[in-house]
């Protein structure tokens, strides 16, 4: 019996169904980030709420709040309290406005910040792009935070917050882990107490290959969610193997992440999903 088999299925526990769709709110740049243009922070929250409403009206099961506008991203130890404070307010407002299950992703790899935000805002889960191994990322060498993050989660009483962890992460060179198979990397996340394994492509908007998805699903007893590159054209294939998808870019105007959600694209995507489940 694997470690993951000793835990409940986080997807069905949180969402009440075996196949789910999670939309991503790509926040505008927050105070302190190079692309922040000043003005009332409330306008950033209003944008996030409008995005959340578009997703909710289309019928998604959950949302992730992500500081994607804070380019270039900082290494975890350099992410400041101003980012955590803004994201906590934004996340709580999105949760209250939609009533959906809400997750948090603090870029880059801010697991401790994400846990504190989730606990303060009542979010259900966090996404961590590099959970159990070290990678050479855009930000430099980033170490997996699992050991520290799980102890911090216990310290702040946030054990109910689930961990969604990427396998074979995007935006990272795999030189450090090149001698280890994808199966081993998937099992590492399970052994280090992640609740959900995320399969991704090489960068935002790129899909995991069918072979990689099948390999990850076969290597772990954790539910597997595809975390990038999901579209109306491939969701049927993906959902035949995965327990869910995390989607954003393909539902945005013109299919690019920095644009607002296109309600027509989102509704059309969800109609396809509803026919599958």
Image (cartoon, rainbow, N blue to C red):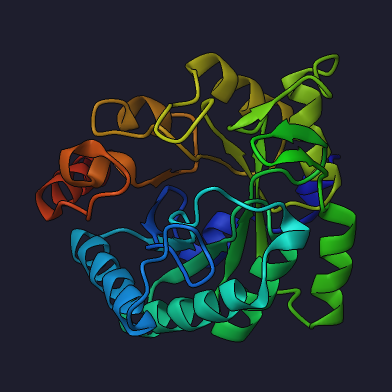
Q: Quadrant of the C terminus?
A: top left
**Up-down: is 210 above or below 68?**
above
Q: Quadrant of the N terminus?
A: top right
> Where is residue 49 drawn, in percent x and y?
29, 74
Furthest residue in direction left, as rendered: 264
**Up-down: is 239 above or below 52?**
above
> Where is residue 274 drawn, in percent x and y?
24, 47
Determine the residue positioned at 85% across, 75% down: 154
Report the front residue among 245 and 53.
Answer: 53
Q: Where is residue 276, by image quadrant?
A: top left
> Where is residue 64 drawn, in percent x and y?
46, 61
**Up-down: is 210 above or below 56?**
above
Instruction: Determine if residue 277 is in view.
Output: no
Report the front residue among 189 and 42.
Answer: 42
Determine the residue positioned at 75% across, 46% down: 131
Determine the residue positioned at 49% across, 18% down: 209
Disc tally is 0
Determine the residue positioned at 27% across, 39% down: 256
> Where is residue 141 drawn, in percent x and y?
79, 38
Instruction: Determine if residue 63 is in view.
Output: yes
């Amino acid at each position: 019996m694997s470690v993951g088999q000793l835990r409940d299925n986080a997807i069905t526990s949180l969402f009440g169904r075996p196949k789910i769709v999670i939309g991503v709110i790509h926040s505008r740049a927050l105070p302190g980030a190079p692309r922040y243009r000043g003005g009332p922070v409330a306008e950033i929250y209003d944008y996030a709420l409008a995005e959340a409403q578009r997703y909710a009206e289309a019928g998604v099961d959950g949302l992730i709040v992500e500081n994607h506008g804070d380019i270039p991203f900082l290494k975890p130890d350099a992410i400041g309290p101003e980012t955590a404070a803004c994201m906590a307010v934004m996340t709580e407002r999105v949760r209250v406005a939609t009533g959906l299950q809400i997750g948090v992703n603090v870029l880059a790899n801010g697991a401790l910040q994400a846990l504190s935000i989730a606990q303060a805002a009542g979010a259900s889960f966090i996404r961590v792009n590099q959970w159990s191994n070290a990678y050479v990322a855009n930000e430099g060498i980033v170490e997996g935070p699992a050991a520290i993050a799980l102890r911090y989660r216990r310290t702040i009483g946030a054990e109910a917050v689930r961990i969604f962890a990427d396998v074979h992460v995007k935006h990272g060179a795999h030189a450090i882990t090149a001698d280890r198979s994808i199966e081993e990397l998937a099992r590492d996340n399970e052994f280090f107490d992640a609740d959900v394994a995320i399969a991704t492509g090489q960068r935002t908007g790129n899909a995991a290959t069918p072979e990689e998805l099948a390999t990850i699903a076969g290597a772990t007893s954790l539910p597997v969610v595809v975390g990038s590159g999901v579209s109306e054209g491939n969701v049927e294939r993906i959902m035949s193997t995965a327990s869910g998808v995390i989607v954003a870019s393909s539902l945005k105007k013109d299919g690019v992440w920095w644009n607002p959600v296109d309600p027509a694209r989102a509704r059309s995507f969800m109609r396809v999903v509803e026919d599958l489940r």
